[in-house]
């Protein structure tokens, strides 16, 4: 059966759980050969085993996106083993919660290192392969926090705003290479990250987790507790985009408008 992503090789970061695992399953269902990466190899292997029903060709690799040398080495390995990398899903991300008054430099760096430096390292590492192919698709995961800020998440919010900015800039810069760069901003998705945040916020504010959850949905008007699968369509539609992200297009250089 011919599927839209047949013969395409996709690399997903943070694919061992939650949203990344769901994206990997969707890409595999669309026909791509998926290399699931995660800083926890056993988690990447677990996702890979879930994809095995579609094809035994899918792969799993240990990849910490904050380790530049490891990023370069793993991308080289994937290109050597699978022929190329057509699609990069920069999904790996972390969050912590704290007041700005109590926020430590370590927490700040942890969020920025994974959420934006990791996106930079992986994007930089994949460009040579996409340049060689004459095309490529990169989809980054920001957050609704990059659109509508929330308290106790200033550091996370700032790192996700950075993902939006990086995406827009990369979209313009890489458009001449026929590489599209887009970004998805999920709301509240039921994963282990959400469970941790509910516990943190409840502790910091002296509330129950249920009360925090209700407040997120009603006051912040974030979408309800979606399951990772509900977001898969969004990532998939980002892959079909023939053009760069809309906000980026507004800034398209005059030479590219012709
Ligand atoms: N869950 C939500 O409500 C929500 C909302 C908005 C955005 N997001 C974003 O979606 C992405 C996925 O979140 P999730 O909810 O599935 O999280 P999760 O914690 O359930 O899964 C994240 C995965 O990333 C991996 N990971 C963490 N640090 C890594 C690193 N340095 N290198 C490689 N892998 C690493 C973890 O091992 C884990 O398997 C993140 O970028 C997150 O910021 C999540």
Image (tube, grey):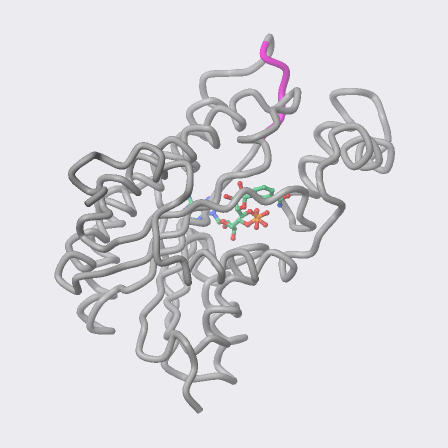
Task: Assign the N terminus to one quadrant of the image.
Answer: bottom left
Residue drawn at (50%, 59%) of the image? 16
Reply above or below: 174 against 79.
above
Measured along the vertical axis of the image, is residue 65 above or below residue 112? below
Residue 43 relative to residue 70: left or right: right
* In the foreground, 230 or 154: 230
For the C terminus, the quadrant is top left
Residue at 48% across, 65% down: 24
Spot the residue most to the left. 132
Most foreground residue, 80 or 46: 80
Tell me where the magenta segment starts and ends, as one range.
96-100
Q: Which residue is drawn at the image coordinates 52% and 22% (left, top)?
A: 155
Above or below 146: residue 7: below
Q: Residue 116 at x, y = what percent? A: 38, 34
Q: Residue at x 83, y 21 (%)?
A: 206
The answer to which quarter of the image holds residue 208 is top right
Q: Position of residue 15 (x, y in %)?
A: 47, 58
Residue 217 is inside the magenta segment: no
> Which residue is outermost to the front?
258
Q: Is residue 98 magenta?
A: yes
Q: Position of residue 196 (x, y in %)?
A: 67, 39
Q: Nearer the viewer, residue 119 or 77?
A: 119
Main SS class of the magenta portion in the image: loop
């Amino acid at each position: 059966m011919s599927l839209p992503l047949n013969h395409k090789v996709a690399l997903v970061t943070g694919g061992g759980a939650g949203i990344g695992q769901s994206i990997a399953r969707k890409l595999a269902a669309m026909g791509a050969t998926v290399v699931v990466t995660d800083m926890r190899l056993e988690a990447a292997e677990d996702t890979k085993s879930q994809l095995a029903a579609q094809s035994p060709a899918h792969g799993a690799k240990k990849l910490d996106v904050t380790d530049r040398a490891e990023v370069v080495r793993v991308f080289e390995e994937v290109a050597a083993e699978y022929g190329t990398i057509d699609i990069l899903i920069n999904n790996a991300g972390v969050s912590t919660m704290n007041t700005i008054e109590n926020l430590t430099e370590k927490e700040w760096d942890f969020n920025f290192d994974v959420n934006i430096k990791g996106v930079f390292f992986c994007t930089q590492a994949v460009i040579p392969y996409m340049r060689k192919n004459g095309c490529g698709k990169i989809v980054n995961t920001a957050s609704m926090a990059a659109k509508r800020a929330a308290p106790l998440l200033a550091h996370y919010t700032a790192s996700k705003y950075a993902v939006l900015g990086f995406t827009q800039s990369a979209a313009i810069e890489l458009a001449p290479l026929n590489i599209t760069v887009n970004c998805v901003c999920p709301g509240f998705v039921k994963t282990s990250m959400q469970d941790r945040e509910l516990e943190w916020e409840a502790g910091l504010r002296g509330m129950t987790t249920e009360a925090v959850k209700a407040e997120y949905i009603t006051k912040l008007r974030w979408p309800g507790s979606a399951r990772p699968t509900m977001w898969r369509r969004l990532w998939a539609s980002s892959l079909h985009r023939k053009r760069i992200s809309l906000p980026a297009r507004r800034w398209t250089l005059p030479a590219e408008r012709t």
